Image (cartoon, rainbow, N blue to C red):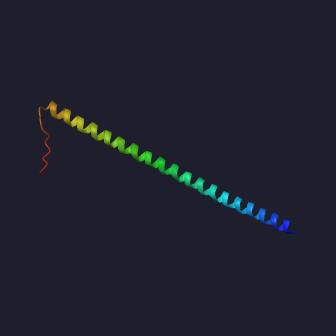
Amino acid sequence: MYYVLSVALAALGIFVLGAVLLHTVRLLRRYNRTVSMVTAESRDRVGLLRARSAAVRVAVARRRDHARADGELHSTIDVNE
């Protein structure tokens, strides 16, 4: 008679283990989805930041070239204003 109790407890244990594993897999999938979304968003923002810094470098280079073409040695921006 004890073997029936042992089989029932083993079956209950396997059921609980399966439920815990299923819950863990769902949580890991959600975590993985969140990580991929954050990674994509970060890459997008880094790309925009690189584009902006490249645009600033181009603008500074054009201003520098324009100032050299006009014969100016220094910038016309006054720091003390």
Q: Nearer the viewer, residue 63 or 12?
A: 12
Coordinates of residue 2 in the picture (x, y in percent): 85, 68
Place residue 73 in its image quadrant: top left
Q: From the viewer's perspective, is 43 left or right of 76?
A: right
Coordinates of residue 26 in the picture (x, y in percent): 62, 56
Count of number-bearing discs:
0
Q: Nearer the viewer, residue 37 or 60?
A: 37
Residue situated furthest top in the rendering: 69
- Identity of the residue drawn at 19% across and 35% down: 64
The N terminus lies in quadrant: bottom right
- Identity of the residue drawn at 85% across and 65% down: 3
Q: Nearer the viewer, residue 64 or 17?
A: 17
Coordinates of residue 4 in the picture (x, y in percent): 85, 66
Place residue 9 in its image quadrant: bottom right
Residue situated furthest right in the rendering: 1
Coordinates of residue 28 in the picture (x, y in percent): 59, 54
Q: From the viewer's perspective, is 37 left or right of 79?
A: right
Q: From the viewer's perspective, is 53 left or right of 31?
A: left
Place residue 20 in its image quadrant: bottom right
Q: From the viewer's perspective, is 78 left or right of 39?
A: left
- Identity of the residue drawn at 14% across and 48% down: 79
